[in-house]
Image (tube, grey):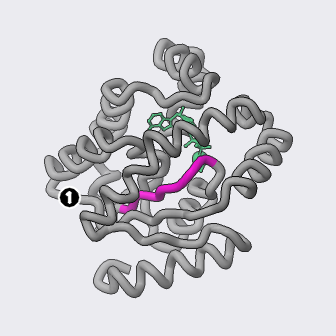
Amino acid sequence: MLNLVIFGAPGSGKGTQSERLIDKYGLHHISTGEVLREHISRGDELGKIADSYISKGQLIPDDLMIRVLENVLDSNPELTAKGVIFDGFPRTIDQAKALKEMLAKRDSKVHAVIGLEVAEDELMRRMIQRGAETGRADDNPETIKKRLKVYHTQTQPLRDYYIAEGKYHGIDGTGSVDDVHGKVVDSLTARLPEHV
Ligand code: ATP
Ligand code: MG
């Protein structure tokens, strides 16, 4: 059993690296961004609320986001049995504390946090390219700038939180997908040999 948090700025490659780790370790993947985008495309009540924040580059409020995640875990008990990659959650200190409690209730914990570290000009370039290729609505220059600002003020402090817990593995997120994946695997192998 291995629970990983994949952490980093928007556009840092969390989704891409999660897919590679799922293939390698047989983990489940929970991307809160994907969960919210599914609700938006269904046009349900949660989707409407989520869209009102995402389109402005803001975070969904903690109490709502925590309930959404708890709901995903409750409706899929097999997820926590095998191990999960949390992609895009937590994004605030309060979310990190809530995740700790949710996993403790299930006799589990976060084993490691993979922090993908990428310079801002490269993040900007990647998201503009993704917006052009996929049409993702929040990948436009104006909203990207707001998301990066929100990341610095609300999410980046989590790095110190997880460093203090001895769980943070910082990885240089530039280079090819394979290069970054190799560095992530090396770091996990060195720090969590009994799990990987
Ligand atoms: P990446 O490019 O690395 O996949 P991202 O920031 O571009 O990351 P998502 O993780 O898909 O994209 O999140 C998209 C949006 O969904 C966020 O900007 C935010 O508004 C909302 N969101 C996702 N997860 C959370 C969360 N844990 N708390 C609050 N809002 C969230
Ligand atoms: Mg993503």
Which image quadrant is residue 179 in?
bottom right
Quadrant of res 92: top left
Tell me what residue is drawn at x 38 percent, y 45 percent: 90
Query: Quick check: 55 left or right of 112?
Result: right
- Residue 31 point in image, percent of width and height: 50, 45
Q: In the rendered view of the protein, which quadrant contains the C terminus? A: bottom left
- The answer to whether residue 76 is visible is no
Residue 144 visible from this viewpoint: yes
The structure residue drawn at horizontal position 32% and vertical position 33%, both measured from the top left corner, is 66
Q: Is 151 placed above or below 54 here? A: below
Side of 168 where 120 appears, left or right: right
Determine which residue is flagged by label 1: 108
Q: Which residues are magenta?
A: 4-10
Give the answer, above or below, for where 57 lies relative to 3: above
Q: What's the residue at 62%, 56% (across, down)?
A: 12
Q: How many marks?
A: 1
- Magenta portion: prevailing SS class: strand
Neighbour tally class for label 1: few under 14, some 14-19, many 20 plus, Cα within 10 Å? some
**Element class at badge 1:** loop
In the image as oriented, which residue stretches furthest toward the right? 132
On whether residue 45 falls in the magenta region, the answer is: no
Residue occupying image coordinates x 55% and y 63%: 116
Q: Position of residue 94 (x, y in %)?
A: 29, 39
Q: Is residue 64 left or right of residue 148?
A: left
Q: Nearer the viewer, residue 143 or 15?
A: 143
The response on whether ligand 1 sits within 8 Å of label 1 is no
The x and y percentages for residue 164 are: 26, 64
**What percent of the width, then of the height, locates residue 85?**
43, 57
Q: Amino acid at mark 1?
A: Ser
Camera-side residue of 135 and 12: 12
| Image quarter in which the N terminus is found | bottom left
